[in-house]
Image: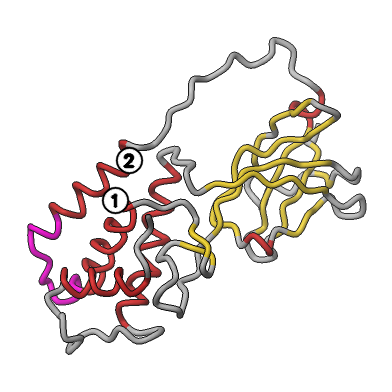
Amino acid sequence: MSLTLAQARTTVQDHVDDGDAVRWTTTDAGDIDRALRSAISSCLEKYARKGGRRFNETVSTTTSASTGGVDLSSYNPLLLNNVAIVVGTQRYALSGVQNQDLGAPDLTARTVELSVMRKPTLSTTTTHPLIGDGATELGSWDDFDNWVCARAAKFLLVKDGAINEALNDLERELKESVMESVDTPRSLRFPSKARWYSEWLRWRYDHRSQFLYVTQKLR
């Protein structure tokens, strides 16, 4: 079960030896909450880059025939992957390109399926989960939450050069435990004949607008 915000704040206080909140405040938007936000983002990205998928959810949506794009702002994505075009009962994986590699917009409404990792928003309600969407947990577990708290404590202490080896060791052990839980699915051989969709269509994501676009590969 995920730690609540109140439990996470207390854990960070214990790590920095500030149980009375003399040095770092525990109020909303205070020092500890800022450290927790930074640590959550950092830990999620490190976990995802190693192939972790525990926080992912599958989204099915449709692109616009006028722009080739689809608005994902309601999901507030931190990371996207496994983007595929769905045609009937078949799925065709698309390769991603950098946003500046525009390509030609694909002006056909396409059913798109993708995996989204939401960017959690730290709640202002102390009984809500540390890693969540309001009162809804996003699939976290003890070691991950405690890794976030240890990293948040290091964030607070680093400016004082006061990080001790015990905290370093704890953060390292928790990180290793989290990374060991990353699933490595068995790969499947790619079809011998590439389909048109996978060969000629690409996807790109605009972080500013939070739109995903399907584009055609330039010939």
Q: Is residue 1 left or right of residue 18?
A: right
Residue 179's mark?
A: 2
Work out whether residue 155 or residue 142 is closer to the camera in this orientation and state it: 142
Residues shaded magenta: 157-168
Residue 111 is covered by the magenta coloring: no
Q: In the image, is 160 to the left or to the right of 205?
A: left
User: What's the residue type where badge 1 is placed?
Assistant: Asp
Which amino acid does the dot numbered 2 rest on?
A: Met
- Determine whether, in the image, residue 99 is placed left or right of residue 79: right
* Residue 43 on image: x %, y %: 37, 55
Q: Which residue does the image show at 53% across and 62% down from the upper left?
A: 136
Among the two numbered marks 2 and 1 on one chain, the one whose residue lies closer to the N terminus? 1
**Whether residue 124 is situated above or below residue 176 in the rendered picture:** below
Task: Give the structural element (helix, strand or loop) at label 2.
Answer: helix
In this picture, is 84 found above or below 212? above
At which x and y percent is residue 176? 25, 42
* Residue 161 part of the magenta segment: yes
How would you classify the magenta stretch by its main secondary structure? helix
Q: Which residue lies furthest to the bottom in this view?
A: 22
Residue at 12% in and 75% down: 17
